Image: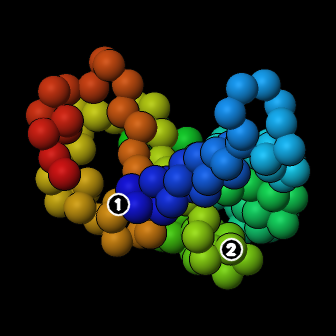
Amino acid sequence: MGKLQDLFTQVRRTQSGGGIGFVGKNKSLTKPRTAALVVALNDFDAGIAESAVKAGADGLLFNWDGEDKSSLETLRKTIEAAQSGNENLLCGLQITGGWDKLERENVEHLKELGLNFVVIPLQAPARLLALK
């Protein structure tokens, strides 16, 4: 969460510093920048993830159906490869199914993979929201 806040702080600093009133001499000459560019990826492919980071992605969002837990090791390797290009890279996981089978241990294991956030849809059980 700290990395995401740092990105927003950086954008806020870029936007501030203008003069009073309309555009004046004190207006900053820096170009506006997006807060964060997050690229959604359907596959756990290290090559595609590294390419997205080299192209300027600030974050990656992976999709997972919640079924194949063995593919999470591939996700870990993909995240490590992508973070080698940008140590401040944000990585998230959108869980698209299998919520009823997820337990506390599974969610804690997701943290160990190097994920910064998890996206859970409204259809997921409320007990998943109580997990930190």
Snapshot quadrant of residue 84:
bottom right
Amino acid type shown at disc 1: Leu
Under circle 1, the secondary element is: helix
Does any portion of residue 72 appear in the rendered image? Answer: no
Under circle 2, the secondary element is: loop
Farthest bottom residue in view: 84
Residue topped by disc 1: 110
Q: Residue at x 59, y 47 (%)?
A: 12
Q: Position of residue 72 (x, y in %)?
A: 46, 62
Q: Residue at x 67, y 48 (%)?
A: 17
Q: Earlier in the sequence, mark 2 or mark 1?
A: 2
Q: Which numbered marker is on residue 14?
A: none
Q: Position of residue 109 (x, y in %)?
A: 29, 65
Q: How many labels sit on residues? A: 2
**Relative horizontal placement of residue 112, taking residue 127 as reference (left or right):** right
Snapshot quadrant of residue 107:
bottom left
What is the distance, in whole Å, between disc 2 and disc 1 at their CAs? 20 Å
Q: Position of residue 115 (x, y in %)?
A: 44, 61
**Relative horizontal placement of residue 21, taking residue 110 as reference (left or right):** right
Residue topped by disc 2: 86
Instruction: Determine whether label 2 and label 1 are within 8 Å by CB.
Output: no
Amino acid type shown at disc 2: Asn
Within 10 Å of disc 2 (Cα), the crowding (few <14, some 14-19, many 20+) is some
Does any portion of residue 47 appear in the rendered image? Answer: yes
